[in-house]
Image (cartoon, coloured by chain):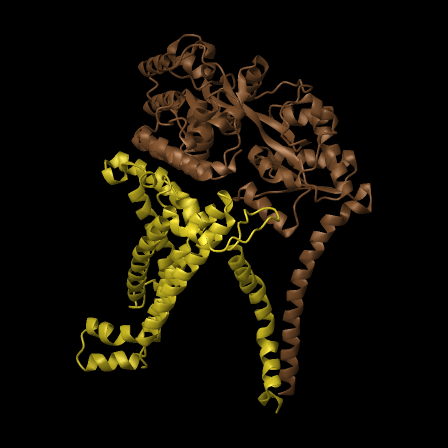
Chain colours: A yellow, B brown
Amino acid sequence: MEEKTFLGKTKHFLMFAGPAMVGFIAVVIIPFIYGLYLTFTDWGGIGNHKNLVGFANYITVFQDGAFWKSLLLTLGYVIVSVIMINIVAFILAYLLTSGMKAQNFLRAGFFTPNLIGGIVLGFIWEFVFTRTLPVIGQTLGIPLFEKSWLSDPTTAFWAFVIVTVWQYSGYMMLIYVAGFVGVPKDLTEAASIDGCTGFQVTRYVTIPLMVPSFVICLFLSVTRTFMVYDLNLSLTNGGPYESTKMAAMYVYQMAFNSQRYGVGQAEAIILFVVVAAIALTQTYLGKRMEVDA
Amino acid sequence: MKNKKVLSVLLAAAMAATLVAGCGSDDGKDNASGDSGKTGSGDVTLSIVGIKSEIYDQWEAMQEEYTDIAGLKGFEMQVTGDETIYSYMQKAYAAGNETVLAMFDPTNVYDFGEQYAVDLSGESWVKDTDWAISIGDKVASFPFCIEGRGIVYNKTAIEKVTGETFDPKSITSLADFTALCDKLVAGGMKSPAAIAQEDWSLGAHLFTLAYEQQDFTEEGTSAFIHEIVDGTKDFATNERYNSVMDTVDALRKYNIYANDPLSADYDMIASYMADGTIAFWFNGNWAWPNISEYVTDESAEFGIMPLVQDTSADDKANSMISGTATKQIIINNTASEAEQQAAKDFLTWLAEDDAGKSFLVEKANLVSPFNNNTLENSDPLSVSVKQHVADGTMYPTWNRAPGDHLTVVGGAMQKYLADGNRDALASSVVDYWTKNVDKID
């Protein structure tokens, strides 16, 4: 029974997890540690001159008002997007599990935006916002659409949110659909027999049993919206006048365009810590609310 | 049980093998391209990155032709895609798989040239051009093409509306320009001008005129930047800054996108320019491929004129356009001896051989930076730029602005297009330079 010894266990572990672990260490762990090291240097991105500068980069980051502004903007964007994505996704899932006609076709339809890459999606919507909507607005005299939404900071922000919701709600819908389908029929039936109305069944039976779906959806939407870059690049490119530059784009430009690699890397680490803290707290709290059927 | 175990071992081994093979084959590729030159001259493969996207097709055809002429093993072209050439090269250098040749913007030659560029001072073409970039004693780059920027005009459209012959030389001040615009408006051309909203156009092309035209030299421009940072000069009240912005205001006024300047669409402007809906567009001769796509009247005439300003008639700004060799090719010193030699031969061929000259001017439609290339361009904007070079009415563009200048100042300019607040613009510019003045010398 070699499986029982420590060596045997290690052997078994390596046999199955080893290859994946090598890959994970090579492309995630090592670059992460190396990146952490770079935050303590004054490296500009090219050449071999690297001097250790201690915490100077972090001090620069804390003095860089534009970074914190962009992080705050990202936070606002995340909050609004996550709430809207999940509300839309939940309603869609609710409707599409209630036994309406063509629900499979509609599920596929709502999921499709998620299959289009963020870059392409951004270009499509850029066209819609700058060319199509203004023409409709001017022809029909709707003031809201007369100007391109992407040329004003406020409307550009909301345009960005709308496209994000459009992109992710189909995906989250699928997870909620699985949640709805996974609720045992006997429980909802029992509740109905006990006199619950349709709303009460959803509120007191279905939703508590679907907490795992909420946890997953919130986790996915929080992390994805926090790290958004592709859509940001192709839809608004940070504009108009840098008013929609999200944290990831700010970090990228700091490292590569402004050629301050150490500072950019330090900002990336801070972004990582913020996202990790929020996502983990949310998952931990969500897990505590889970109930067994 | 036994079978399962064997199977799992096999599976794990297979996965591990593919993983290693994956890494291995990459290494193999790098070595192949890195060492191929050492085996003999017939085995040299040249590679290049950063070709202007407008001339991909012509470049590929030329590459094939040249591979046969020079007996190369191959000639490959890499594209940077959505990335800037700067970050692309940064990664390539870090990974050690950089191309033999690289086509850069001038600012990148300063970024990478000192460390990576082969010295080209011994090449025979050096005497025929004024546009190579030298770093210290070394000639770091081969100038590929000259591009100029100013106000692009559609001569035919102007003449059709005004009924008079249009001579760009007759427009020597902002007053002349606005008078002509008013005439065009009266003649039925509702909005005679356009300004692109792209940050590179606003930040790197339009706004930098306010620095360059301080004294029209590159050294003077760098010195001026230092002066506005240390407070010797006040930027907000600077005469040149204000006269450039006065003209920008005129363009804003006659802008076809005046109601919503940031919704301007580059391709739409090109089409308006081509069909005569508008007559003026601040841009450069690289816009020709975009414009020509929409030109239906083959006899229509176009050209580039200076961004005229409300200054005295003898102000150089009213007669000269800004231009420089905007694409520069370097040879990486990390390439093997044989590759470097093949690359040098290639550059000499481009500059001196009839086929090379013809490629640049007749096929790719670019303005040659070499005096010994007397071929005629066929596209009107290049002809116009070439004319400015010949007439001595082109002053050298200042190209030392760091990579993020165009995003930051371009962003501030976008804001200006919308709100017209000149003080806010000036203070964000001074702010930018205060943080970044250490990047220029």
Judged left or right of residue B96, residue A136 is left
From the viewer's perspective, is residue A86 above or below residue B60? below
**Residue furthest out toward the top:** B164
Give x and y (percent) for residue B152.
46, 21
Give x and y (percent) for residue B377.
60, 20
Using the image as rendered, state which of residue A293 and residue A65 is in the foreground.
A65
Quarter of the figure that contains the N terminus of chain A: bottom right
Using the image as rendered, state which of residue B77 and residue B441 is in the foreground.
B441
Judged left or right of residue A101, residue A34 is right
Res. B421 visible in picture: yes
Quarter of the figure that contains the C terminus of chain A: bottom left
Res. A174 visible in picture: no
Give x and y (percent) for residue A286.
33, 71
Q: Residue at x 38, y 42 (%)?
A: A242
Give the image quarter of residue B27.
bottom right
From the viewer's perspective, is residue A3 above or below residue A112? below
Give x and y (percent) for residue B271.
44, 27
Give the image quarter of residue B197.
top left
| Total count of labels | 0
**Residue furthest out toward the bottom:** A1
Q: Residue at x 38, y 55 (%)?
A: A167
Using the image as rendered, state which of residue B437 and residue A29 is in the foreground.
B437
